[in-house]
Amino acid sequence: MEIYNNHKKLFTAALCFFVLLTFFVAIGPAFTSQNNNAPLPGSKPLNRLETEGKAVFIAEGCVACHTQQVRNVDMDKVWGTRPNIAADYANITRTDVWRNTATLMGSERTGPDLTNVGTRQPSNDWHYLHLFNPRSVVAESVMPSYEWLFDIKDYAWPNDVVVNVPDDFKKGITGKIVATHKALALVAYLRSLKEVTLPDGKPVPIFLYGKSEAEKAAANTPGKGVTTKPEFDGAALYASNCQSCHQGNGEGLVGAFPALKGSKVVLDDNPEVQVTIIMKGYNGRVSEGYGVMPAVGTNNNLKPEEVAAIVNHERSNWGNNSKKVTADDVKKIIATFGKPETVIAKK
């Protein structure tokens, strides 16, 4: 054929074929995908500070140890309320013309998945302390310390964010530990990572490979050689919602998070203040150096039965021994939230 003897025709044909193939294989599917994947209602694009924080997340190599994908397997239930779908990533856009910060789904979980960390751990103070020294809040953590994201100052300016680090983890530092702009941005980005509730009527993906209903029923049937477990495990709920700050021994962290062991609020027979703090958060001890407690119960959509289980766990452990509460007690207290505020006592 003449085309094989004419290099101009040969290269022109090859170029046209390449452009045509590129359109059908890459450009066309990209446009189709873009038009068919709208962000979920309620999802928000990153603001300027959060976008800067994402860049810090990438620069510090966090993606090497943390995923951002809740898979549809039973073992991933601890990381999110549902498996991720494509629409969860539809709000992610290019940083600029030259850089495309794609989804940071990751491939390894040396550390926990971060898809829903903004809901699991909404406390700014916890994140700053965790970045400065991970062992201060999670004793078993293998995460490196990111101390370079903080400045040491003799005096803090009014707008400075001072991190209250327990003395055992200060490593001889005597000045004020202040979060830099990079630390502020990184924490803002981490707190922005939240799963959005799917619209009503949209099928919710299921977690696969969990126990079937028959297996669960058999496991909870007396006489089958398995001890019946309570429906709401206070110890497990405390571990997943409260332990990262107040610690497994209930003693908190001196100068950072108050203790529940021996707390007047926990020992009070009237659970109103304790339930209110769990559901609405608390900032009454900021002047003492403690951080603001977020509204854990509300943020994590805890049921009254789950709140009651947490309250009873706190009231019956670490030497605490106070009156147990019921789910009905919790419901009655929550029902009063629309009424004039109750004065919350100090823990």
Image: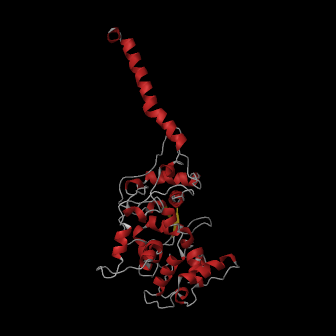
Q: Quadrant of the N terminus?
A: top left
Percent position of residue 179, x then y: 52, 63
- For the point 53% across and 52% down, the residue is 52
In the picture shown, does residue 240 fall above or below 72? below
Farthest residue to the right: give it.
340
Chosen colour scheme:
secondary structure
Residue 267 in view: yes
- For the point 41% across and 60% down, the residue is 207
Where is residue 288, by image quadrant?
bottom right
Where is residue 170, by image quadrant?
bottom left
- For the point 47% across and 86% down, the residue is 261
Asked whether 338 or 92 is in front, the reply is 338
159 lies left or right of 137 = right
Q: Quadrant of the C terminus?
A: bottom right
- For the point 54% across and 81% down, the residue is 327
Percent position of residue 203, x then y: 50, 56
Asked whether 303 or 91 is in front, the reply is 303
In the picture shown, does residue 333 fall above or below 35? below
Farthest residue to the left: give it.
225
Percent position of residue 283, x then y: 60, 75
Percent position of residue 162, x then y: 54, 68
